[in-house]
Structures are given as structure tokens and as C-alpha cells.
Amino acid sequence: MRKLLKDEVRLLELLIKKSSIIISYNLEEDLEAEIMNDGGMGSLKLFPKGISSDNRVFGKQIAECMFLDSDGIDVIASLNIDDKGELFELDIWKTDFSSLIRIPEIIS
């Protein structure tokens, strides 16, 4: 488990803004992440403060965005919550299945 990187926080903030959920905690201080085994595409399991990995179940996708990686390949980022409405996963899929190079500064 680790703290989020600044570009991950930026991406999460964008996705949360696109969704209908309200987060009452500080993402940088109160959210930890665990890298998912996705071939280096950048997906993360998300753990709000006080929530462990035990017995968590996928709820639904609440937001999605698309951006270009620096090599010109499309990337789709989705934000998922668990069945209790807590942040669950940042799912990142690079359409050619290669490793993510970086999350861009500006995402529309």
C-alpha cells in the first residue's frame, strides 16, 4: 500500500468531479492505493482511511475519461466504487495493452 502520486490524485479529482459522488476526505492524506496486476497500465485498488481489502465487492463504475498517452495510444480511465459507495478502483486500460507512460497534465 502506498500514498497516491500527484498525477493519480489529479486524475481521480477529474473523475470524481464527473461523477455524482461526494468525497468528504482528502485524497492525498486519507486514501491509499495498491498497484493492480494489469501489465503496467496503471490500475489501482483504492483504500479510503479505515477500510481494508477484506470482503470488498465491486459496486459500479461512476465515471470515465479518455486521454492519449505520450506515445499517442488511447487510454481509458474508469473510477469504480464498492457496494457500499466507497472508492474501490481506478481502472486504467491502454488500448494496445502496453504500459502507461504517464498521465498527462491536461485531460479533457
Image (cartoon, rainbow, N blue to C red):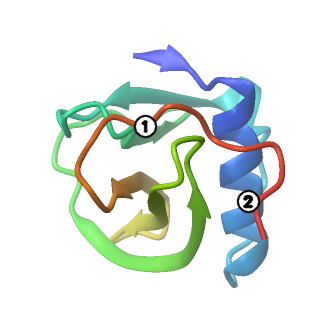
Residue matched to label 1:
100
Single out the mark in the foreground, 1 or 2.
1
Kind of element beneath mark 2: loop
Residue 59, percent from left and from top:
31, 75
Kind of element beneath mark 1: loop
Q: Nearer the viewer, residue 32 or 39?
A: 39
100 sits left or right of 31 in the view? left
Crowding around mark 2 (Cα neighbors within 10 Å: few <14, some 14 to 19, many 20+) is: few
Asked which quadrant contains residue 67, the reply is bottom right
Residue 22, percent from left and from top:
75, 70
Of mark 1 and mark 2, the one earlier in the sequence is 2
Q: Nearer the viewer, residue 29 or 77?
A: 77
Query: Which quarter of the figure is the C terminus placed in?
Result: bottom right
Q: Amino acid at mark 1?
A: Leu
18 sits left or right of 51 in the view? right
Query: Which quarter of the figure is the N terminus placed in?
Result: top left
Q: Nearer the viewer, residue 91 or 85?
A: 91
Residue 61, percent from left and from top:
41, 78
Q: Amino acid at mark 2?
A: Ile
Residue matched to label 2:
23
